[in-house]
């Protein structure tokens, strides 16, 4: 039970990264296009591009991309808070931003009060950055503070999540009832984050030293570390835990730290984009792309070979249908880097195939690392991103290695998969005993191996004596009763609340039992507005709203 809770929590944590990370592909494409057409190699090949109007547009795109990449900590603070929150996400977002500001304002105050705030007045930009980096300080949104990197944003996001989870359900006395629920969260966040800031002021230098040591260990692990990362990253994918491994490496000091153009850059994606933008770099450091470049190989070529093997081993009568499914999935993987349709299909029918795939994927990262490949992408290792982040960036990325390594990997995947499918009679698409041919979904694959997708509040707890219940249990039972009094789950369209009223929209108001709502479930009053039933509960209305939403499995 504890293991399942841990996996669920880690999966939720990993998924929370998806919201802030979703900003990066768009921002990265803008910056990638801009840097592709402003670097010296491109301008030497196409002198006509070196005109003021075109270069203005390209630099404009770079500035748009930098708006995201230069502010990743605050994006993660807001994004992780929103991604983890199950309800009242607007309150979580505001609290994430406020918590981030409080953290860095307090750190600035503490640095100044302790005499540790570095004075950069009168220094040139590069010299100032180096001095700040040496003191483990930086500027965040114009605030000189401790350099927490993206970790600072993640810490804020997680802290706000726990504050939000508790504070959003608190019922304050009637005299200050206006501040109950979501309005209470930012207030508590300010207090809690000030305490977190004081704590980080004393412990972060120690933590940062530890992170730096771990980062150095990862970088010094050499090819073996690259291979293991590739295997583990694929092995975590079916559990939804791979984001918890990927994004700390790509965006924080765990992935490494490099001095690029006079500035200390942490995280592999940040370092790669900084390297693309630096015209003095003629060959990108493979240590930056070691956990990334090899993915192009198996995303584009390896899984296409696996798809072709499944097609060739399909029953002749089913081959045409299987081919249309497999080749469309392979094309999706090749072009966009979306691999789940193929990966979850052979995981579904044969975990052994997936284990072999994870091993071969690790070797592709290893080979690209050993060959010195310098190509990477923030996300989506397909042909489209290879063009933007590799081919258009010129020879510094060694993009051609993707094809030199990828083509042999197509045949490696093809022959290995074909041998295993025939040897062990795996029921890949077109080889099923039933007449239906289909790709497996993520839910089917996880469900088969006991990785259940979470559902919230689908079952009613047994009714017990309210005198023996906790406050939370009483709220739950009251919410269950209110659902029934409103005609049951099938009759409820929407659930919301204002400051004092629980507002439930229904399909058929004749099924609503107003007397039960007032007399048994203690509403202070009842009103109707069309198909919206309004029960007056004061500040408690918001608590009931969220409990009912949980039970029904709906969000705001």
Image: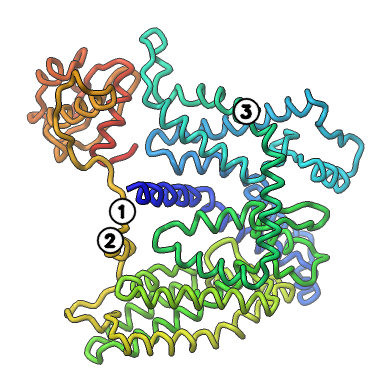
> Furthest-bottom residue in view?
316
Q: Which residue is mark 1?
A: 453
Count residues near mark 1 (Cα–Cα under 10 Å), then give few for <14, some for 14-19, many for 20+.
few
Q: Residue at x 65, y 73 (%)?
A: 223
Residue name at image x 54 percent, y 88 percent:
408
Location of mark 3 (residue)? 102
Q: Position of residue 191 (x, y in %)?
A: 56, 22
- The residue at which mark 2 appears reads as 447
Callout in the foreground (1, 3): 1
Helix, strand or loop status at disc 2: helix
Indicate which disc, 1 or 2, sits on the residue closer to the N terminus. Answer: 2
**Above or below — where is 315 with respect to 57?**
below
- Spatial CA distance of label 1 from label 2 is 8 Å
Quarter of the image where the C terminus is located: top left
Tag in front: 3 or 2: 2
Q: Of marks 3 and 2, which one's residue comes earlier in the chain?
A: 3
User: Would residue 44 appear left or right of 14 to someone viewing this image?
Assistant: right
Q: Is residue 364 left or right of residue 542?
A: right
Q: Position of residue 243 (x, y in %)?
A: 49, 56
> In the image, which disc is placed on residue 321?
none
Contact between labelled residues 2 and 1, with CB atoms less than 8 Å apart = yes
For the residues labelled 1 and 3, the Cα–Cα distance comes to 36 Å
Question: Which of the two labelled residues, at mark 1 and mark 3, occupies the earlier sequence position?
Answer: 3
Is 463 on the left-hand or right-hand side of 381? left
Residue furthest front as drawn: 2
Crowd tier of the residue under label 3, counting other residues whose Cα lies within 10 Å: few below 14, some 14–19, many 20 or above: many
């Amino acid at each position: 039970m504890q293991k399942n809770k841990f996996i669920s929590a880690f999966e939720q944590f990993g998924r929370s990264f998806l919201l802030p990370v979703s900003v990066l592909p768009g921002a990265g494409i803008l910056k990638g296009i801009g840097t592709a057409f402003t670097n010296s190699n491109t301008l030497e090949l196409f002198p006509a591009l070196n005109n003021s109007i075109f270069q203005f547009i390209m630099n404009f795109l770079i500035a748009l991309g930098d708006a995201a990449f230069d502010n990743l900590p605050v994006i993660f603070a807001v994004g992780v808070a929103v991604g983890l929150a199950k309800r009242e996400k607007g309150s979580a977002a505001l609290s994430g931003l406020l918590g981030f500001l409080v953290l860095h304002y307090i750190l600035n105050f503490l640095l100044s009060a302790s005499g540790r705030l570095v004075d950069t007045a009168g220094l040139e930009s590069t010299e100032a950055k180096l001095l700040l980096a040496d003191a483990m300080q930086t500027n965040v949104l114009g605030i000189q503070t401790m350099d927490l990197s993206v970790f600072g944003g993640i810490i804020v996001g997680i802290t706000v999540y726990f504050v939000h989870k508790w504070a959003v359900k608190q019922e304050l006395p009637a005299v200050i009832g206006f501040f109950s629920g979501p309005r209470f969260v930012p207030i508590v966040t300010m207090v809690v984050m000030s305490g977190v800031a004081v704590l980080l002021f004393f412990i972060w230098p120690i933590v940062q030293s530890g992170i730096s040591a771990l980062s150095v260990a990862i970088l010094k692990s050499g090819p073996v570390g690259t291979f293991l990362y590739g295997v583990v990253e694929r092995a975590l994918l079916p559990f939804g835990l791979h984001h918890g491994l990927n994004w700390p490496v790509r965006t924080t000091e765990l992935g490494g730290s490099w001095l690029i153009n006079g500035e200390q850059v942490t995280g592999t994606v940040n370092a790669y984009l900084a390297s693309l933008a630096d015209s003095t770099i003629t060959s990108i450091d493979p240590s930056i792309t070691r956990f990334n470049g090899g993915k192009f190989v198996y995303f584009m070529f390896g899984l296409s070979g696996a798809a072709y093997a499944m097609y060739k081993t399909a029953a002749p009568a089913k081959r045409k249908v299987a081919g249309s499914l497999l080749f469309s999935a392979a094309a999706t993987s090749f072009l966009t880097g979306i691999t789940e349709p193929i990966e979850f299909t052979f995981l579904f029918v044969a975990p052994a195939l997936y284990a072999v795939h994870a091993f071969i994927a690790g070797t592709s990262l290893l080979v690209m690392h050993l060959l010195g490949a310098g190509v990477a992408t923030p996300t989506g290792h397909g042909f489209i991103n290879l063009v933007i982040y590799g081919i258009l960036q010129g020879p510094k990325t060694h993009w051609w290695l993707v094809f030199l390594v990828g083509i042999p990997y197509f045949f490696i995947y093809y022959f290995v998969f074909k041998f295993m499918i025939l040897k062990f009679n795996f029921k890949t698409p077109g080889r099923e005993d039933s007449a239906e041919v289909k790709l497996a979904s993520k839910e089917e694959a996880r469900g088969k191996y006991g990785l259940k997708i979470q559902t919230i509040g689908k079952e009613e707890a047994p009714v017990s004596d309210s005198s023996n219940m906790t406050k939370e249990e009483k709220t739950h039972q009251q919410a269950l009763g209110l659902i029934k009094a409103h005609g049951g789950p099938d009759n409820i369209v929407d659930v919301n609340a204002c400051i004092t009223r629980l507002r439930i929209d229904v399909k058929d108001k004749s099924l609503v039992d107003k007397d039960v709502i007032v007399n048994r479930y203690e509403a202070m009053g009842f009103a109707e507005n069309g198909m919206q039933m309004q029960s007056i509960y004061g500040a408690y209305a918001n608590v009931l709203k969220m409990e009912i939403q949980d039970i029904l499995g709906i969000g705001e």
